[in-house]
């Protein structure tokens, strides 16, 4: 019926069989941003956010989220991740995040990096929402990926 990889001949959703695919080294990087008031960014910078260390909590949340991506995204394969790193940049208007996930495996790791970036940003929101409820999460995207059948990819600037 369809050439879509997650639909069978009858049009029913199914998990793609990756059993015959070659194991390759794969890495994906996702980025995003949360805009906030000067007061909220100051609370993060000086450690006075009401709920504690915002960046530490967001980093742990992002790593945990990457590890649980298959529980959140339908038909996503559970992956044995080799590494997940979450980096933050404190900006004048908010916080930028970069999540990097890697493994040696048979299927892509883009969803793990995107989930890690997204949950890191949501955690920042949760940690400082008492200071600024008008924060805006945006620009979450896949920045790059390496490995696999489709090869390397870099987001256009």
Image (cartoon, grey):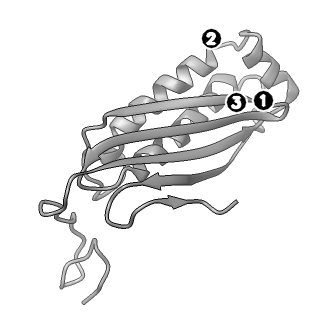
From what the image shows, is residue 148 above or below residue 6?
above
Name the residue carrying label 2. 52
Q: Quadrant of the N terminus?
A: bottom left
Badge 1 marks a residue whose secondary structure is: loop
Asked whether 33 or 73 is in front, the reply is 33
Cα separation between marks 1 and 2: 15 Å
Does the CB distance between marks 3 and 1 fall below 8 Å? Answer: no
Q: Nearer the viewer, residue 129 or 8?
A: 8
Which residue does the image show at 82% across and 18% down from the upper left?
42
Would you identify the image quadrant in which residue 5 lies? bottom left
Which one is in front, 12 or 130? 12
Closer to the chain start, of discs 3 and 1, is 3
Circle 3 sits in a helix, a strand or a loop, which is it?
Answer: strand
**Residue 138 percent coordinates (x, y):** 68, 49
Residue located 79% across and 31% down the image: 91
* Percent x, y of residue 110: 43, 52
Structural crowding at the residue carrying mark 2, measured as other residues with C-alpha within 10 Å and reported as few (<14), some (14–19) or many (≥20): some
Q: Is 14 placed above or below 134 here? A: below
Pointer 3: what residue?
89
């Amino acid at each position: 019926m369809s050439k879509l990889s997650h639909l069978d001949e009858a049009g029913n959703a199914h998990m793609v069989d990756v059993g015959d695919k070659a194991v390759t080294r794969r890495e994906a990087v996702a980025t995003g941003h949360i805009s906030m008031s000067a007061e909220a960014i100051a609370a993060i910078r000086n450690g006075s956010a009401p709920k504690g260390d915002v960046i530490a909590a967001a980093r742990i949340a992002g790593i945990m989220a990457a590890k649980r991506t298959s529980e959140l995204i339908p038909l996503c394969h559970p992956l044995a991740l080799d590494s997940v790193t979450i980096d933050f940049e404190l900006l004048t208007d908010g916080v930028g995040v970069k999540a990097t996930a890697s493994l040696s495996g048979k299927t892509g790791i883009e969803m793990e990096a995107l989930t890690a970036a997204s949950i890191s940003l949501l955690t920042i929101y949760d940690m400082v929402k008492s200071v600024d409820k008008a924060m805006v999460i945006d620009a979450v995207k896949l920045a790059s990926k390496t490995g696999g059948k489709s090869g390397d990819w870099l987001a256009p600037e």
